[in-house]
């Protein structure tokens, strides 16, 4: 759940909200949303403890078409576009790390409300996508070993940077205290807070991972809640603390809108002589997150194809390495195509729009399951308020997103809805093939 978005999303938040306090509140609210979502998802996870997550829940609660929409969105946005975001961020941090690298671009081209550009960061971003996809091609064991190394160094490094930063870093608390506190009763405050939730939501991706192992959890009615609450509070605390460290390192004007807010903050805290170490660590954390998403994403499409709900070739497994190689490299291809989008924040808004739509449908599944007569031994605390809060907050964020960023939101919506013609096209093709087989037999 601890991702790398914290090192580049806060710069976008600060540009959009214009206030340090709103950014901190957005990170806190994002953690509360993650908590509400995780204890809500646990109901479906305990009832249907099978591989596939949202795909399985939506298929049983609603219909196969909505389930396919979830998997399709995972292919195009939830996973592939997330990989692109991280790869592009990695490319930009590498340029910060090695300023002697020629920083060129083709220039910006606008198409359908989105800016497209090929640059040095784009080319650099292709490299980790190909590397980790190849690593997955050679089997899950080697990929997981590498991922464990990334995760261990990431956690140790984050804790060390926070402790050392506050203890001996070049902090200036006046940067925070001199920031005017917003009028929390104004419409402008709520609008800025909700639009701030969009990039924050990206950084909290992974809050639903505990629900995927519900079948293996003893006393789920206690332990699922305990795990979800503990994880969400710890990660929220870590994110808010890191942001505090960023905000006491430099004036907000030098951080707003910056892709490399983490590198700027650490350079101000520890000096330029350690910038190679701190920027390199951030690039390492980004690579670790990218590796994890590549591992998880390709397996979703593989599971769908094996279930007969997607292109059959995606279910093929390599004879020697036992990896879903077609799913892995197709995901890599889509992610590389998304690298052509110029701004990281554009990708963030597209991803979040799709995720908000589908996660709201999944969050509502307990109502559907109860109506269909399914009973789970897991009880949602304070039912139904966590569900109501989670869905209401998602809807509010979507309304603001469509108002503030209509082109990006429409792209996310269009990608999500494009699943339907693909689904019915595959379904029709299967009927035609089945009819031909019956004629031959």
Image (cartoon, rainbow, N blue to C red):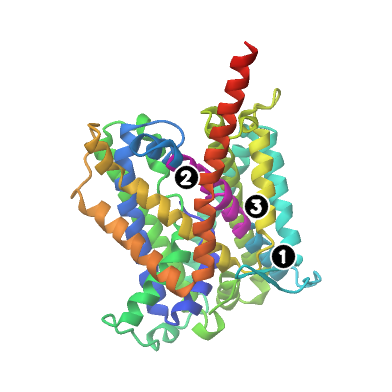
Span shown in magenta: 66-86
Q: From the viewer's perspective, tell me whether residue 100 is left or right of residue 253.
A: right
Q: Identify the residue shown where x is 25% and y is 55%.
A: 388
SS under mark 2 = helix
Q: Is residue 183 visible?
A: yes
Tell me, yes or no, whether the two marked residues, 3 and 1, touch with CB atoms within 8 Å.
Answer: no
Q: From the viewer's perspective, tell me whether residue 57 is left or right of residue 81.
A: left
Q: To which residue does mark 2 refer? A: 70
Q: Which numbered disc, 3 or 2, marks the residue closer to the eye?
A: 2
- Chief secondary structure of the magenta portion: helix
Residue 110: x %, y % from top left: 67, 72
- Of the two numbered discs 3 and 2 on the same chain, state the one appearing first in sequence: 2
Q: Which numbered disc, 3 or 1, marks the residue closer to the eye?
A: 3
Q: Identify the residue shown where x is 44% and y is 79%.
A: 17
Q: To which residue does mark 3 refer? A: 335
268 or 362: nearer the viewer: 362
In the image, residue 319 above or below residue 384: above
130 or 426: nearer the viewer: 426
Q: Identify the residue shown where x is 62% and y is 77%.
A: 271
From this viewpoint, which residue is outermost toward the top?
441
Q: Identify the residue shown where x is 34% and y is 66%.
A: 396
- Of the two numbered discs 1 and 2 on the same chain, state the one appearing first in sequence: 2
101 or 129: nearer the viewer: 129
- Distance of mark 3 from mark 1, alpha carbons? 14 Å
Callout 3: few (<14), some (14-19), or many (20+) C-alpha neighbours within 10 Å?
many
Residue 102: x %, y % from top left: 81, 71
Residue 205: x %, y % from top left: 46, 53
Is 71 colored magenta in this rendering? yes
Tell me, yes or no, whether the two marked residues, 1 and 2, touch with CB atoms within 8 Å.
Answer: no
Q: To which residue does mark 1 refer? A: 121
């Amino acid at each position: 759940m601890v991702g790398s978005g914290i090192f580049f999303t806060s710069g976008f938040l600060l540009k959009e909200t214009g206030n340090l306090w709103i950014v901190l509140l957005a990170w806190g609210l994002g953690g509360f949303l993650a908590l509400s979502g995780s204890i809500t998802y646990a109901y479906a996870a305990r009832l249907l403890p099978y591989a596939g997550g949202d795909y399985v829940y939506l298929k049983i609660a609603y219909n196969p078409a909505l389930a396919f929409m979830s998997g399709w969105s995972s292919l195009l946005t939830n996973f592939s576009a997330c990989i692109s975001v991280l790869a592009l961020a990695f490319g930009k941090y590498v340029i910060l790390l090695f300023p002697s690298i020629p920083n060129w671009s083709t220039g910006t081209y606008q198409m359908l409300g989105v800016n497209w550009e090929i640059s040095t960061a784009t080319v650099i971003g292709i490299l980790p996508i190909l590397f980790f996809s190849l690593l997955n091609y050679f089997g899950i064991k080697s990929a997981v070993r590498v991922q464990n190394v990334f995760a261990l160094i990431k956690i140790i490094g984050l804790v060390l940077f926070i402790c050392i930063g506050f203890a001996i870093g070049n902090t200036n608390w006046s940067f925070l205290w001199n920031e005017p506190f917003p009028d929390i009763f104004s419409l402008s405050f709520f609008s800025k807070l909700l639009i701030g939730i969009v990039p924050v939501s990206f950084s909290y991706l992974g809050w639903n991972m505990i629900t995927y192992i519900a079948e293996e959890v003893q006393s789920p009615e206690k332990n699922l809640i305990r795990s979800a609450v503990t994880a969400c509070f710890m990660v929220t605390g870590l994110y808010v603390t890191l942001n505090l460290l960023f905000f006491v390192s430099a004036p907000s004007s030098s951080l707003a809108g910056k892709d490399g807010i983490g590198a700027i903050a650490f350079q101000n805290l520890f000096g330029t002589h350690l910038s190679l170490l701190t920027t390199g660590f951030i690039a390492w954390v980004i690579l670790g997150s990218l590796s994890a998403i590549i591992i998880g994403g390709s397996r979703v499409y593989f599971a769908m194809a094996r279930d007969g709900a997607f292109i059959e070739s995606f279910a093929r497994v390599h004879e020697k390495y036992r990896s879903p190689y077609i799913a892995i490299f197709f995901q890599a291809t889509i992610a590389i195509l998304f690298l052509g989008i110029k701004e990281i924040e554009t990708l963030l808004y597209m991803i979040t729009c799709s995720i908000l739509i589908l996660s709201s449908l999944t969050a509502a599944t307990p109502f559907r399951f109860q109506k269909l007569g399914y009973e789970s031994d897991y009880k949602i605390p304070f039912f139904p308020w966590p569900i109501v809060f989670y869905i209401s907050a998602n809807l509010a964020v979507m309304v603001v997103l469509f108002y503030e960023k209509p082109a990006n939101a429409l792209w996310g919506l269009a990608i999500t809805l494009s699943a339907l013609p693909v689904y019915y096209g595959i379904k029709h093709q299967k009927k035609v093939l089945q009819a031909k087989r019956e004629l031959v037999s």
